[in-house]
């Protein structure tokens, strides 16, 4: 069983600040983390490997500093890690990103065929949820998104059964390997890496691939050139013109405050009074 | 084999032509909205998108069309009828047993075929679980741009292109994205972000039917069964008219009952901020905000919620927002309609009591 897990290093968005004057994102000094959704996929991949044997290869496309994120994955128990890094990939939108990652996975598969690819449900920065489906299309793999549970994998028959979240319920799907899975958050809990893996991660040399190593000969589909979307403007959300009407509280009991609120609200929004209690 | 080779050999349809290749993009004409029909029901986000699509189509002076894929059953015909009533001039229809339940492959193949045959300039889909699964696949087979989770759609007059605005970095910034040299221009919008348009009962239009080409034998993924959510799990939060929510300021899980009590008296639903769903005070599907549900109620009451940007983006569509917070400087007062600086643990039960009395008085008067 050979599983490739795609991860992305993202800024810890709880700590993102926007420059008040220039409206640009102040990335400097913002710590980076592995996209939290990717950890559910990595853990599921590790579990399947532990059950069925084989190996887990983790890949990411990004700058050199993404090596840290890959090493972290090794410390959790991943077997190998590859960093796809090349300036031709700069400015990739999701179409160009899925092209670069799919090419890389196809190349990896030349040495050891890939049975499954795992992606996160979405990232917390770009937050499009488009890269996984893009990779699945390009590699002609069955696409299984929002998976809550991998029920069983039969390697001999090349079959897999999963529970997929859909509107109003869960689809139980049977399909063939190779396939691409994105895991739902909360579907498992990331393990603590063993001492051995921790030591291995410290010494591990992450392979660095450029576009040629990934088997890409024509770069027209890469980076800014290969990206149909164009970001034209970045700006801060406009402030609300009208401030909240504050209900006076001094010297009032909670009940008096509540009555004062309801009187104000229904005076301004008479229709609302008929809506309540329905 | 590299992905490049595979693309050349196996992509079933021609990619949308690029302006850079000297292709004439003006053959792409009209605004399409994908009508999300699943198990006999249309997701309301489809109607919200028809409302938005109407504005774009009018601005461009082109027709607005719904696209309906589904089984050969009455619900599919009904979805077409409703699409007209919510504003579509025409409907592109593809039906057959292979489209009975949503699966990525036959839906992607069907839509790809429709787009390549009839060439719309804009294609809108809901950012639901189905819509996100489909949009990402479709944009890849069409090799075109797809902007996710837009909160505003406009036409840029200079380029006649779709200007799609979406929040990024958790809503702290907005960015406007264009797809200039590829067609169609694709975008997804989350449920409840756009307003529901008025329905014109009985309005009809032209149905253009096209046959699905993918035979069932070619569909590798099979549906073994469907496990419907229990009613308790089916939080209809996104579509509730009245929502009461609590945050970390409530202090402990037992206090959440105060929120539920008020919601019950109001006849509304309840939810919470991320910390309280993460801590398990209430179930995860009741989280409101950027990574939870977007709501658009007539009345939203937030108690003990600070109003962080990731929460704000999920509630801004509410008509009236009432905030109860002990901190006069809490950011929630920047976007609330009414504010009370006070202890939610005291104000919530007082509000419940006051409302109970008003409702009783109303009943007695009837
Ligand atoms: C503010 C902003 C807005 C954007 N909006 C759009 C948009 O609307 N449309 C668009 O096409 N592009 C958009 N982009 C570009 C997009 O973010 C990048 O293409 C990015 O490389 C991948 O998209 P994502 O972060 O949305 O990933 P998602 O599609 O949300 O990621 C899903 C999964 O794919 C895998 N994955 C994603 N990126 C990588 C990677 N670099 N290496 C390894 N695995 C990865 C991970 O497993 C991840 O969990 C935007 C970028 C920014 C900064
Ligand atoms: C990637 C990302 C995605 C996120 N997505 C979401 C999301 O979808 N939804 C979401 O909600 N958050 C989200 N968050 C988290 C968000 O940034 C905030 O941390 C969160 O909304 C804060 O929740 P809170 O207001 O309940 O808690 P706090 O920020 O801790 O606020 C508690 C408030 O209660 C007030 N208070 C205290 N005691 C009382 C009292 N007795 N009576 C009245 N008021 C009292 C305090 O003054 C304070 O304002 C996200 C964050 C990130 C990084």
Image (cartoon, rainbow, N blue to C red):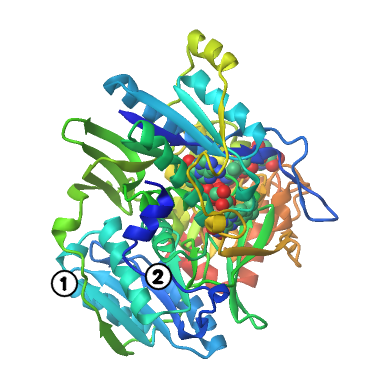
Q: What is the chain identity of the residue bearing mark 1?
A: B
Most foreground residue, B61 or B142:
B142
Q: What is the chain identity of the residue bearing mark 2?
A: B
The answer to which quarter of the image holds residue A56 is top left
Most foreground residue, A212 or B147:
A212
User: Which residue is farthest right?
Assistant: A21
> What residue is at 38 percent from the left and 38 percent from the top?
A117
Q: Position of residue B199 (x, y in %)?
A: 40, 82
- Give the image quadrant in which the ligand numbered 2 is located: top right
Q: Mark 2 or mark 1: which comes first in sequence?
A: 2
Q: Position of residue B225 (x, y in %)?
A: 17, 47
* Neighbourhood count class around disc 1 (C-alpha, 10 Å): few under 14, some 14–19, many 20 upward: few
Whether residue B22 sits left or right of residue B132 in the image: it is: right
> What residue is at 55 percent from the left and 44 percent from the top?
A211
Whether residue A274 sits left or right of residue B97 in the image: it is: right
Q: Position of residue A120 (x, y in %)?
A: 46, 41
Which image quadrant: the C terminus of chain B?
Answer: bottom left
> Does the closest atom of ligand 1 sit within 8 Å of the Cβ of label 1?
no
Q: How many marks?
A: 2
> What residue is at 31 percent from the left and 35 percent from the top?
A115
Q: Secondary structure at mark 2?
A: helix
> Mark 2 sits on what residue?
B46
The answer to which quarter of the image holds residue B70 is bottom left
Q: Is residue A241 visible?
A: yes
Q: Is residue A193 above or below residue B299?
A: above
> What residue is at 36 percent from the left and 81 percent from the top?
B118
Q: Is residue B175 above or below residue B349?
A: below
How far apart marks 2 and 1 lie (CA) works out to 19 Å
> Mark 1 sits on what residue?
B73
């Amino acid at each position: 069983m050979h599983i490739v897990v795609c991860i992305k290093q993202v800024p810890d968005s709880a700590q993102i600040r926007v420059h008040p004057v220039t409206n640009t994102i102040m990335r400097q000094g913002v710590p980076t983390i592995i996209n939290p959704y990717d950890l559910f996929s990595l853990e599921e991949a590790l579990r399947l490997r532990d059950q069925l044997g084989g190996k887990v290869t983790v890949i990411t496309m990004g700058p050199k500093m993404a090596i840290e994120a890959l090493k972290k994955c090794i410390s959790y128990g991943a077997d190998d890690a590859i960093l796809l890094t090349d300036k031709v990939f700069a400015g990739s939108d999701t179409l160009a990103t899925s092209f670069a990652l799919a090419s890389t996975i196809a190349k990896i598969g030349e040495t050891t065929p890939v049975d499954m690819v795992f992606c996160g449900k979405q990232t917390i920065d770009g937050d499009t949820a488009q890269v996984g489906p893009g990779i699945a299309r390009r590699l002609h793999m069955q696409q299984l998104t929002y998976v809550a549970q991998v029920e069983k994998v039969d390697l001999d028959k090349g079959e897999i059964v999963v529970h997929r979240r859909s509107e109003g319920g869960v689809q139980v799907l049977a399909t063939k390997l190779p396939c691409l899975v994105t895991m739902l958050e909360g579907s498992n809990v990331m393990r603590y890496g063993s001492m051995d893996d921790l030591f291995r991660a410290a010494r591990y040399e992450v392979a660095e691939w450029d576009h040629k190593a990934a088997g890409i000969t024509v770069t027209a589909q890469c980076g800014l050139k290969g990206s149909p979307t164009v970001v034209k403007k970045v700006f801060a959300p406009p402030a609300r013109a009208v401030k909240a009407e504050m209900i006076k509280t001094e010297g009032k009991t909670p009940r008096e405050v509540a009555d004062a609120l309801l009187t104000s609200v229904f005076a301004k929004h008479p229709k609302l009074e008929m809506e309540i209690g329905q | 084999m590299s992905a490049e080779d595979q693309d050349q050999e196996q992509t079933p349809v021609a990619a949308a032509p690029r302006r850079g290749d000297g292709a004439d993009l003006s053959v792409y004409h009209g605004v399409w909205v994908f009508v999300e029909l699943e198990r006999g029901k249309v997701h309301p986000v489809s109607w919200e998108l028809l409302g938005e699509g109407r504005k774009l189509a009018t601005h461009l002076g082109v027709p607005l069309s719904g696209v309906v894929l589904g089984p050969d059953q009455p619900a599919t015909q009904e979805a077409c009828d409703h699409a007209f009533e919510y504003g579509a001039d025409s409907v592109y229809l593809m039906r057959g047993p292979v489209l009975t339940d949503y699966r990525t492959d036959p839906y992607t193949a069907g839509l790809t075929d429709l787009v390549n045959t009839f060439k719309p300039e804009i294609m809108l889909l809901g950012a639901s679980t189905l819509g996100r699964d489909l949009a990402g696949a479709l944009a890849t087979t069409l090799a075109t741009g797809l902007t996710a989770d837009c909160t505003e759609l406009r036409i840029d007059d200079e380029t006649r292109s779709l200007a799609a605005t979406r929040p990024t970095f958790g809503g702290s910034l907005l960015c406007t994205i264009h797809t200039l040299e590829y067609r169609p221009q694709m975008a997804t919008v989350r449920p409840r972000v756009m307003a529901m348009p008025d329905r014109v009962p009985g309005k009809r239009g032209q149905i253009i039917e096209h046959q699905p080409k993918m035979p069932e034998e070619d569909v590798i993924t099979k549906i073994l069964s469907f496990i419907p959510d229990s009613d308790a799990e089916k939080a209809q939060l996104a579509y509730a008219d009245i929502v009461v929510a609590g945050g970390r300021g409530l202090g402990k899980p037992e206090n959440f009952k105060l929120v539920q009590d008020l919601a019950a008296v109001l006849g509304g639903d309840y939810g919470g901020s991320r910390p309280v769903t993460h801590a398990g005070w209430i179930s995860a599907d009741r989280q409101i905000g950027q990574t939870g549900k977007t709501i658009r109620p007539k009345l939203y009451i937030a108690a003990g919620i600070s109003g962080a940007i990731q929460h704000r983006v999920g509630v801004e569509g509410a008509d009236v927002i009432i905030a109860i917070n002990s901190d006069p400087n809490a950011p929630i007062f920047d976007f609330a309609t009414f504010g009370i600086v006070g202890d939610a643990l005291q104000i919530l039960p007082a509000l419940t009591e006051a409302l109970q009395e008003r409702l009783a008085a109303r009943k007695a008067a009837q």
